[in-house]
Amino acid sequence: MKLDLRLISHLGQSEVFIHIGLRLSKVYSVESATRSLGSDASGCLTAMVLDAENRIYAPKLPLISIIPNGITAGRSILVKGLVTGKHRNNFAVNLCCGLLTDGLHRDNIALHVNPRFDSEHKLVLNSLIDDTWGEEQRHKNPLRKGQAFMLRITAFHDLFKVAFNREMIVDYAHRVPMAEIKTIQIEGCVIVDAVEYFAAPPTRPLNGLSWTPDSGRSRANVQPFVLRDKVLPLRVPVNYKNGYPMISFTMTVLSYPHRIEMDLVSGEDIAFHSSIRFDEQAIVRNTLRQGKWDKEERLLDIFPFQPSCTYEIEILCFPELFVVRAGGAHCYNFSHRLRVDLIDTFSLKGSGRLLRLCIE
């Protein structure tokens, strides 16, 4: 059946009517941004409900989904999936300005991310404006058929940063205002496990500086310390005497996890102990001093980790507290209980496989 999409009123102002043939079949509220549109086996659009944490799991393709609250600087979108290579030699993730993505007239595409698996094997970035494609930005394609991947698109004031598996990061300057972006579209030779939306991280003072998506790191002229593909447990030295390093790592949770523990160690004490407990569906934070545990803090209402998934975790230090982010989104805080400048070791152990660790 031929699908005819008609926008009865403008996106972001009222409602969108999905018209199939001559029959009005469904009404979707754009302002609430609580429903997404996917396709069933026949190619017709179907409705999917986002969960409370703004995630879509295992959507059917092709997918077009309203982006909750739009795109602003610091916001990121994470797409997890698998390149299949079936029927097509490419796939596309598009940030669009509406629901019209096919036909003679299409809404603008602010960002077109298009890995191609033909003889050239290129990653192409572009924009569609007034039904005309702009100049292609071409890079080496970091993916191969049959490979699992994580695509992260992070918005900045003047550009997007596009990262695949955190190994390849390219910049793409805005050609369409971010405020006009309303939807995400995914199609092609790919299976999508999840689409996740993350808000901009909070901005807090740090010795006169601020942690923002556009800011530099807190310690000038310090070369990053990087490890890859290490077996847990792991202990590495860290230095908090001359500034606050940021610790970031990419880790895949095992299929049947028990716990993952992150510790910032100060001699015989643990200044910051963070225990991700899959058996309790809780994140426990505490301090060990003189051989005794302090009063623990727990995160019970939100547990963002799942077995067999890969996560990027960041540990930031501020004058008053530690901040932990997962997937670019703020996860939890922990106020200092011991002197930060005495921290000398970072420890990571438990039910995970470390892909990359960076201290900078």
Image: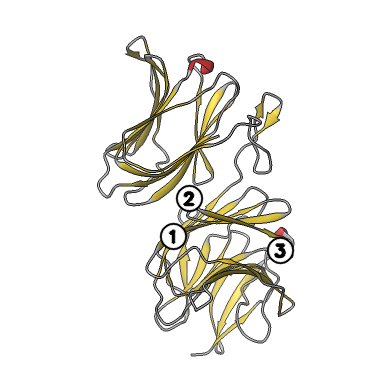
Looking at numbered disc 2 in the image, what kind of residue is underneath it?
Glu
User: Foreground: 224 or 183?
Assistant: 224
Residue at the outermost top position: 290
Residue at position x 44%, y 60% from top? Answer: 149
Q: Helix or strand or loop: what does disc 1 sit on?
A: strand
User: Where is residue 105, by image quadrant?
Assistant: bottom right
Q: Which residue is mark 2?
A: 53
- Give, as a three-letter code, the residue at label 1: Phe
Q: Mark 2 falls on what kind of element?
A: loop
The colour scheme used here is: secondary structure
Q: Report crowding for label 1: few under 14, some 14 to 19, many 20 or more residues within 10 A (C-alpha).
A: many
> Against 164, is 256 above or below?
above
Displayed quadrant of residue 260? top left
Task: Give the CA distance from mark 3 to mark 2.
Answer: 23 Å
Observer-side mark, 3 or 2, equals 3
User: Disc 1, disc 2: CB below 8 Å?
Assistant: no
Find disc 3 in the rendering and name its residue.
180
